[in-house]
Amino acid sequence: MQKALTYIITKLFGLYINILGYISPKKATKLAYRFFSEPRSGRLVKEQLPDVLQQAHAEMVTHGDFIFPMYTWEGNDNKVLLVHGWESNASRWEELITHLKRSGSTIIALDAPAHGLSSGIEFNIPRYAEFIDVVVKKFRPNYMVGHSVGGATILYYQSHYTNDAIEKMVVLGAPCDLNTLLTNYAGMLNLNSNAFLLLKNHFFERFRIKADEFSGSLFASKIKVKGLLAHDLNDTVVSYSEGKKIAEAWPAAEFITTKGLGHSMHDEKLYNRIYSFLFDK
């Protein structure tokens, strides 16, 4: 019953945007973009942090008009930066952190814009990359691990910022093309061609991003460091084909196909493989 109600509400919302697109294009664009960019879960309450985050040293960082938390599990001079995905937060790394601690490394994680304890209501990859750059400049991590949109963000980051401190990258279940995300979003709401074009134009006007050119495969093609990519055949959130496109464009990356892990990619065997990739010489 709840699923049916959600489906009906979603389609009615899309119909409203379609109609508004002809009457007031600016309002329609603002509404469509806000629904696309505003996460509806993944927030945390400071007084009720998950145990794994309570065990870390937490620091609130100011970046322009934004504030975001940076969590550090102290260790040796080897440093690993963990970058979570959409509607999640730094606590999603709890299982992987347990594995990484065996290496004695210092582990760092952050909350994305509008996630966890970070300020704001809007998420976008360029701003997330700015947050990452603040952390990278402070810690100069050797390795970065990103899941889902976090994986797409570290691809964007390393292709645009090209930080020479980064030696290896791990990307799990990442989407490749912004155009695919927008197309899926438009399909979910049944947006017509006019509303879809308004949304695409918004990305260019605000971020100077052409949706057809904002691609993980394009970002990956510019990355020289070693990579480990993993994507699950049964991922119903981000298609397996998205991972393959990134892998084909990144010559220095190894591509692992998993089955039965879904989008979360939580798995003992996979985490051991990540450990070996990062720390075995």
Image: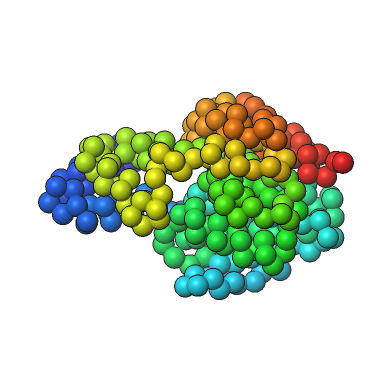
Q: Quadrant of residue 122?
A: bottom left
Report the quarter where the N terminus lies: top left
Question: Is residue 92 visible from the viewing direction of this image?
Answer: no
Residue at point 22%, 56% (across, down): 26
Left or right of 10, for residue 231: right
- Residue at the spot 46% in from the left edge and 38% down from the top edge: 177
84 up-or-down from 75: above or below: above
Image coloring type: rainbow
> In the rendered image, is residue 99 in sight?
yes
98 or 37: which is nearer to us? 37
Residue 52 position, x and y percent, is 69, 58
In the displayed orientation, state which residue is furthest to the left: 23
Residue occupying image coordinates x 70% and y 59%: 108
Counting from the top left corner in percent of width and height, residue 127 is at 49, 59
Q: Height in image: 55 above or below 276?
A: below
On screen, residue 275 versus residue 220, left or right, reads right
The C terminus lies in which quarter of the figure?
Answer: top right
- Please state the horizontal and vertical placement of residue 97, each as a whole percent of the image: 73, 51
Q: Is residue 141 left or right of residue 115?
A: right
